Image (cartoon, rainbow, N blue to C red):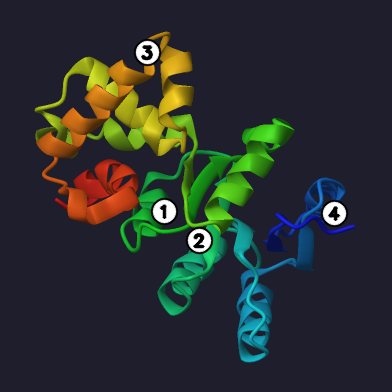
Amino acid sequence: MIADDSVRVVIAEDSVLLREGLTRLLTDLGHEVVAGVGDAEGLLKTIAELSAADALPDVVVADVRMPPTHTDEGVRAAVRLRRDHPELGVLVFSQYVEEQYATELLAGSTRGVGYLLKDRVAEVREFVDAVVRVARGGTALDPEVVAQLLGRSRKQDVLAGLTPREREVLGLMAEGRTNSAIAKQLVVSDGAVEKHVSNIFLKLGLSPSEGDHRRVLAVLTYLRS
């Protein structure tokens, strides 16, 4: 049975076992898996057909590495889908943090994007929450991805004005956590987090006109410097 708040998903993963497992996981929680494919070509073809039928899914969940070379086919397809269908959420996952691919994926539109490590799939609730968040236009970045990207030496000048606590808050924002969740994680008040977030926006030059997307832009600003 499909719940009223369910999201529609296409899964691209060459491991049949993992693909079927993700399908079962999502459907058991009330979401609709529209299609499952095993390679990047199949993913692009499926999305093209769904788009032509005016039936795009809410989100694509794709492995970074897929056949035939198992290098970057999945993420290349993901980047292409984000370019061709900006309304489509794209969540990629990988065995390791692949900085180049993460940067390329995140350097475009800031709506509906995620990058998780495969280990995160085992944390069922967190994984499903990430899929739903990306489907609804949010962001979901693995803590390890955030740590590596924010730690890049050539980007330090962008974030030089942030305090250690503000960097910590920024990292949690990148994971997609709300202010309340950040407050709980850091054992501080909601008001303290709101102050840190406001300071981050100010120091990164993000005006109120950016609306809710400032939370994502705050994380991605350094990618564009």
Is the residue marked by circle 1 packed among few (<14), some (14-19), or many (20+) residues within 10 Å? some
Give the Cα distance between marks 3 and 2: 38 Å
Mark nearer the viewer, 4 or 1:
4
Q: Indicate the position of residue 139 as horizontal and vertical percent values.
A: 46, 47
Q: Indicate the position of residue 184 as horizontal and vertical percent values.
A: 48, 15
Is the residue marked by circle 3 packed among few (<14), some (14-19), or many (20+) residues within 10 Å? few
Give the Cα distance between marks 4 and 3: 42 Å
- The numbered mark at residue 189 is 3
Q: Indicate the position of residue 10 as horizontal and vertical percent values.
A: 70, 65
Is there a contact, CB below 8 Å, between mark 1 and mark 2?
A: yes
Q: Which residue in the protein does label 1 denote?
A: 101
Give the Cα distance between marks 4 and 1: 25 Å
- The numbered mark at residue 75 is 2
Q: Nearer the viewer, residue 85 or 147?
A: 85
Residue type at mark 2? Val
Residue type at mark 4? Glu
In this rendering, is residue 169 above or below 33? Answer: above
